[in-house]
Amino acid sequence: MRLFIALSAPENARQALEMTQRVLRRQGVRGRFTLPDDLHMTLTFLGDGKEPAPVIEVMRGIEPARTELVFDRLTMFGNILVALFRSDDAAQGYVRALRKALDEAGIGFDRKAFRPHITLCRDAAFPSSLKLEACGDPLRGVGIPTQQVHLMRTAPQGKTPRYSVIFTKE
């Protein structure tokens, strides 16, 4: 079981993300698209073999940021097509505090810098003529609120992992 701490997309954002995926498919993008129910923004990836209880204890001690991360643009992280969101000091501060508390509790995590994004498609391939910026139009002005943070787990199901919420901190 893999664990990670994440934000979920509210219904309006989920609909805009799904619409963006449909636009991308119509424009010839191929790859493994994230299932609608699995669209989320990872704050901290914890990895395999972690017990949820100590992570939940850490999460209980830190208040989530009271902000909203607003869509910026579509971009690629290697071969992964993502919706990138603008960060702010409150969100970055929460992630720093969370990671510091995890560190102090002896809970290991992936130390990559937090870049607020939602994965839309893995192993993405698309025509060289594709203009990514135009495909992101359904997401213009869409935000992801940070007030509700989830501890989630990955459960493998064939080629596509499925995600489920273990704990929510509001």
Image (cartoon, rainbow, N blue to C red):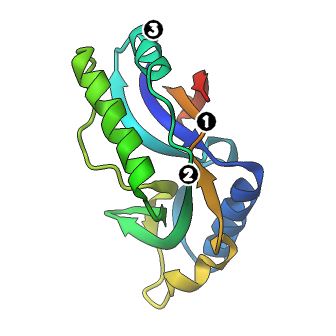
First in residue order: circle 2 vs circle 1: 2
Q: Residue at x 23, y 15 (%)?
A: 106
Asked if residue 105 shows in the view, the reply is yes
Instruction: Name which residue lies at 44% across and 26% down.
Output: 62
The front one of 168 and 89 is: 89
Question: Is 92 rendered above or below residue 110?
Answer: below
| Neighbourhood count class around disc 1 (C-alpha, 10 Å): few under 14, some 14–19, many 20 upward | some
Cα distance, mark 1 to mark 3?
Answer: 18 Å
Are there few (<14), some (14-19), or many (20+) residues within 10 Å of tag 3?
few
Q: Nearer the viewer, mark 3 or mark 2?
A: 2
Question: Residue type at mark 2?
Answer: Thr
Picture residue at 42% right of the left edge, 87% below the top: 128
**Percent coordinates x, y for residue 56 in the rendering:** 47, 15
Q: Is residue 160 visible?
A: no
Eyeballing the image, is 134 above or below 136?
below
- Residue 25 numbered mark, or none: none
Q: Nearer the viewer, residue 136 or 12?
A: 12
Which callout, 3 or 2, points at the residue further toward the start of the chain? 3
Residue 81 lies, in percent from the top left, at 46, 64
Image vertical order of residue 138 relative to residue 49, above or below? below
Identify the residue under disc 3: 53
- Classify mark 2: residues with Cα within 10 Å, few (<14), some (14-19) or many (20+): some
According to the picture, the residue beneath numbered tag 2 turns out to be 67
Residue 71 horizontal/vertical position (percent): 55, 67
**Tags 3 and 2 in contact by the CB under 8 Å rule?**
no
- Residue 1 picture location, percent across and down: 44, 19
User: What residue would you read off at disc 1?
Assistant: 148
Q: Are marks 2 and 1 in contact (CB under 8 Å)?
A: no
Is 163 situated left or right of 48 in this image?
right
